[in-house]
Amino acid sequence: MSFNSFQDYLRYLEGQGEVVRISAEVSADLEITEITNRVTKAHGKALLFERVRGSRFPVVTNAFGSYKRLAMAFGQTPDEIAGKIESLITLKVPQGLADKMKLLPRLLELVRIPPKTVTRAPCQEVVHTDPDLSIIPALTCWPHDAGKFITLPLVVTASPEDGTRNMGMYRIQIYDKTTTGMHWQIHKDGRSHFSQYARAKKRMEAAIVIGGDPATIYAATAPLPPAIDELLFAGFIRNKAVEIVRCKTVALEVPAWAEFVIEGYLDPEERRTEGPFGDHTGFYSPAEDYPVFHVTCITHRKDPVYPATVVGPPPMEDAFLAKATERIFLPLIRTVVPELVDMNLPVEGAFHNCAIVSIEKSYPMQAQKVMHALWGMGQLMNTKMIIVVDGDVNVQDLSAVAWKAFNNVDPARDLTITSGPLDALDHSSPYPLHGSKVGVDATRKIEGETVRAWPEEIRMSEDIIRLVSDKWKEYGIP
Ligand SMILES: Cc1cc2nc3c(=O)[nH]c(=O)nc-3n(C[C@H](O)[C@H](O)[C@H](O)COP(=O)(O)O)c2cc1C
Ligand SMILES: [Mn+2]
């Protein structure tokens, strides 16, 4: 199952009873946030707001706000996607013709996934060459937000050096009819393209895509290495090429089935205050200077819907997208950290602040090796706290982790305090963008790490467990 567009996905969700239509008039100013927040926190359905004050277009929130809907969006669970990746990277060199023939269908699958250029696209059914951003029902999410923000945008750029495309989700503050902020943080790929344009003293083109098929929307949030095209990755997830179309006023290609596309450019010298914005840490990110995007054209479908998300005190909808990343990227991390068994990025940590990992330990100080490996890896470099437990501990069970962390840790030996880059949203460190980090080695200590014998964990013997289960009714305990 794969969807062409966000609307296709929405229709499918509705068929599955996963959508609530709200026909009462609502305001995009705070009201949609309060409704969405209540529904997301109650593990509720996707919300289709049919009548948004002052807007011709309906607004959808919470489309990805449950594990069930996420699996529907991908046509498979994130674990199944991880399995596909794992089978690709553990591919054995084929021995003989029979082996090669078996490989063929899998390789053909891969041939199908690069984006495919089309000349006519739904996202260009309506073209506004005299653009006005006020047609977009962007939300003002929280009381102290600086204004309206596009909260689920896919920002497409290309490197001026080698043409590599990038598509990242960076929130867009709307300043007026034709200008917006561009909140790509310093560690992100779009921002590194921007620096390349600045070095070359060249104006930068960009396109802000709203909508697209669900795998494409997710791909914009995925922490892929810079050289990997997010649209190729979306094709891999969907098992089907993403159709793309050339923009009207900039030399970029965008998903053809998007709801809206905002085309424009950035001057590498220009900055303007962006924010404050109620962010996914649950705190406001402060007003800061960011680049400015100038709109040259807006295109959209004849009858677009506007997908949005609301971030704020966790858990919110983005928690589910991030949990998908936690699952999907596990096999890739394991190629470098083979002892890694599982990983939990608790939603309360807003993904950069806490990682709990389990490992199969075979030599002293291996937990410390794993911490440092993760602190050196992609966006995990921003992780503030890493808790390492043994492979038999379920990292998703916070009580099990706390038991080990409280009882196994000798602070002087087992806490590693270091420093390094932090996420742009971190507010705890004395200076922005960097600060201290802590690793907690909560594994059982082995020879070489302690001179004492490590105690055995208490477990009932199997035969008694079976006996008590068999006799349970006899005891008369309800
Ligand atoms: C709802 C949502 C909003 C986000 N907003 C921003 C943002 O404003 N700025 C930013 O740098 N990253 C933001 N992110 C995280 C990036 O999308 C993520 O780090 C992604 O990997 C960036 O793509 P890149 O690796 O191609 O730069 C957001 C993620 C989500 C799910
Ligand atoms: Mn990227």
Image (cartoon, helix red, strand yellow):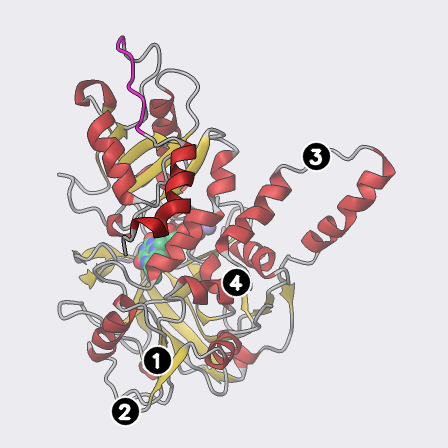
> How far from the left and from the top, in percent, is residue 225?
48, 44
Q: CA distance from mark 4 to mark 2?
A: 31 Å
Q: Earlier in the sequence, mark 1 or mark 4?
A: 4
Q: Is residue 5 left or right of residue 416?
A: right
> How far from the left and from the top, in percent, is residue 22?
32, 87
Q: CA distance from mark 1 to mark 3?
A: 50 Å
| Secondary-structure class at tag 3 | loop
Q: Which mark is residue 92?
A: 3
Q: CA distance from mark 1 to mark 2?
A: 19 Å
Image quadrant in which you'd find residue 168: bottom left
Type of amino acid under label 4: Phe
Q: Is mark 3 within 8 Å of ligand 2?
A: no
Q: Earlier in the sequence, mark 4 or mark 2?
A: 2
Q: Which of 24/222 is in front?
A: 24
Question: Could you tell me which residue is drawn at 55 percent across and 52 percent down?
Answer: 81
Residue identifier under label 4:
74
Q: Which residues are magenta?
A: 451-458
Residue identifier under label 2:
24
Q: Is residue 193 left or right of residue 431?
A: right
| Secondary-structure class at tag 4 | helix
| Secondary-structure class at tag 2 | loop
Q: CA distance from mark 1 to mark 4?
A: 27 Å
Type of amino acid under label 1: Ile
Question: Could you tell me which residue is drawn at 53 percent across and 45 percent down?
Answer: 227
Residue identifier under label 1:
136
> How far from the left and from the top, in percent, is residue 273?
20, 60
Q: Residues within 10 Å of mark 3 (few under 14, many from 20)?
A: few
| Secondary-structure class at tag 1 | loop
Question: Could you tell me which residue is drawn at 47 percent across and 37 percent down?
Answer: 333
